[in-house]
Structure formats: C-alpha cells, structure tokens
Image: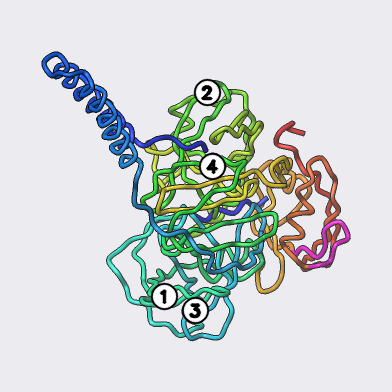
Amino acid sequence: MQFENQYSHKTRSSGDQNQAIYGSRFFGQLATRTSDRATFIKPAPMRLLTIPMLLLLFSVSFVQAQEEFIPPPAKLIARFPFKLLTGGIITVKARLSNFPDTLNFVLDTGSGGISLDSSTADYLKLRPQLSDRTIRGIAGVRRVYFAYKQTLHLPGLLVENLDFHINDYDVLTSAYGEKIDGIIGLSFLSRYIVGIDYDSLKISVYTKGTIKYPRGGYLLKPQIQTIPILTASLRDNRPLTSRFYFDTGAGMCLLLSADFVSDSNFIKPKRKWYATQAEGLGGKAPMKQGVVKQLQVGPFRFRNVPTYIFDDEYNVTQYPSLAGLIGNDLFRRFNLIINYERRDIYMIPNSHYKEQFDYSYTGLGMYVVDGEIQVVDIMPESPAEQAGFKPGDVIMAVANNFSNNIQTYKNLMQTPGERLKILVLRKEGPIVLTIKVKNILTGR
C-alpha cells in the first residue's frame, strides 16, 4: 500500500503432545495388565521378562511420535541491491518480458498483487484488458485493466506468468522525484522467501522450504490473505491493542483511521495535530500529523512515534477490523525475512534501530513537475505559509544546495528547529525565503 509523507524458541506441537500422552496411557494400561497377570501367572521369572518387553514397546512408540515429514531446505536463488527513498520506501530495478528498458519498482507488502504504471504500459505499447475486478486506494475505487502473462526479470531471477494490473503512479513519481514504473506485492512475495537487509541494502530471494532464522530476532505470526495483518499495542491517553496492516510501501511509521481514533478515545485530548497530506493509490489525501506516546510490536517498544490520522472515506484501513497500518519508516529499523507460506515475518534489529524519528514539519508540498521542483500545496497555518511560499514557486536551492534533487531537499528539511534559506523562482524573478522547520514533538 503506497503512502508517501511529504513534508525462538521451539515448542512441541499439539500432535507430539497427543502422541506422548497416548504412549503414556498405553504403557500404563499394559503395566496394569502385567500386574494383573502377575497375580495369576507363575513362576516369578516371567514377570522379569515381561517388564523389559513393555519398556521396549513404549520406547518404540515414543520415538515414532517424534518423526515428521519436512519440506526440503530453502535455497538462495538470487541476491540484488535496492534503493531506499524517503520514509523507507524500497525500490528495485527490473525488466518486463522482452522489453530491454530497466524499470523502477517499489517492493510493497501492502500490495495485494503486482502492478504497472499506466504511462509505462503505454510506452511499452502493451494492450491491457479491462477486467471486472476493482481496486481501492486512498483516493477512490475503480475497475482495473490487466496485462496478463508477463515475465519479470529481476537480477538473477526470472518470475513468469504474472498478471499486472494497470494504475496511475504519476503522483508517486512526482513526489519521489524518480520514475515509479510499478509495484511488486503479493504476486511475487507469495512465491518465495524474501530477506530484506537494510544494513547492506540487499534483497535475498530463497525457494520455499525449511529455513533456520538467525538468532537475536523475533518471529511475528501475522494473518496473511493478501496483505499481512499483525497485532500491536498502542499507548497514549490509555493503552489498547489492535490489528494493523504490515506495509513496507507506506513511507511513515504509523497511520490510524480517524474513525478508530474517535471511537477508541485513546489519544490525549490536548495532543496537537498539524495539517498535512500523503500520496497513494489514486492521488493525494489530507491527513493530520502528530505523535503517539508508545507503539509496541512484539517485544519492541517505540516511544513518541510520528503518527498520521486519516479520514478514510473509502475504508482502505478496513476499520473496525483494523486500526490502520504500520509503515516502513518503522520496519526499516529491522532486517526482515518474509515467509508468506509459513505466515512468518522474522525481524532482527539492525543498525537503524535506535535512529531518531523524523519530527520535522513544514507543511510544504513539493513535487517534480516537468523537471522542476515546484511548490504545489501549502498547508494552512504551517511554517511554509508563514514563510511566504506560494503555489507555483520553483525550488532552486535549499541551504545552498543546488542539486535539483527532491529527495535531497526533503532530507535537508528534516531538521526540526532549524531556519533554512530556500531560493525560489517566480515570474518576477528569484527570491530567498526563510522557513523555520517545526518540531511536532515539542510543538516549537
């Protein structure tokens, strides 16, 4: 699911327990019978022969109860690099079918299939077919076209017979400053075991099978039909536990449904929230940005978590079944092994685990338009409005950085409390504006 922020222990199975109980009962019954026989059968040496035989019978029964058939070991079949964009978004390079062009795809556990950008489909001269299926995103619901039986060429790996649904990712391309040609989700992740290492920026792909997870991590057991759903705990005005989407395609830490927030009444009434927006399937959506006191996933607790509240008109967050989603600005702090077949997500804290959260807020909506970085949206009562920005301003430089790279400019603006000089171009000429980046944690 795409959102971009602007601004082991081993336990015995029940089967084994039942077998062990059955064996114990079996031994007890035979022993009783032997005891009964001993009352009538003589001489005594027969009793001595009977007891060892019974011990042997019990021993064989118990050993057989420990046998089980297991699939073959998982094998590493590919390893390739990925790039991390703002908010922890993962992009990988791949080719489609027989086309020579290298394309950019987002790896997204929040996608219930696999998709291709409509402009990319036009460029490749594909002929998608209208289906009777619909797709739901933050900006609406619509019927979708499919490009059937396509092949995805990842580095060292060929993935065949994929049905790509066609979508418009122009707003994501503008927000990231890089062409987004598609999104890789369930259709790929369900075929393999996938490891994501945020320290080395490498993805490892394994065949399905048995795999030993490394020490030092924690095993999540999410519900997986199309998108993984996990249980997590929140604390603010009061503690509560709810269910959330596990969404590597969301460039944020936590997103909550406004209905959930209202009904649960768990957020402190005096919390300050700031107007913002996010980009996703179908366009942009207004949100509120603030902080929640604590989020706990498994044994891992995070304090003062940046949070978005979303008035979910199309119920993307599936309230009341779910409270919202947990995104990749939090999960990038763990190296992950995603094993859909076993319904496993194994997470190991990595070198980013203790990194400070991004508490910056500008209220400035920047997008790449015709090669220029333009101001498109300005949130009311935001630092951007107070600094004098106007829609249509072209960002020429941020803090003397003239790279014309929107990712770089966004990173420079993630400095709460700093005053930044920004060179903008207007019809009447260039002008320097000064913006003070607000800290949503302290309110200053």
Q: Position of residue 418 (x, y in %)?
A: 84, 44
384 sits to left or right of 113: right
Kind of residue indicated by mark 2: Pro
Q: Which mark is residue 160?
A: 1
Q: Residue furthest top?
A: 39
- Disc 2, SS: strand
CA distance separating discs 2 and 4: 17 Å
Nearer-the-camera pick, 411 or 161: 161
User: Label 1 sits on what residue type?
Assistant: Glu
Say which label, 1 or 4, has the lower sequence index: 1
Instruction: Find disc 2 in the rendering and name its residue.
Output: 239
Query: What is the span of residues highlighted in magenta in the rendered image?
Result: 394-403
Point 43% across, 35% down: residue: 11
Q: What is the three-letter code of the residue carrying label 3?
A: Leu
Q: Say which label, 2 or 1, has the lower sequence index.
A: 1
Q: Amino acid at mark 4?
A: Leu
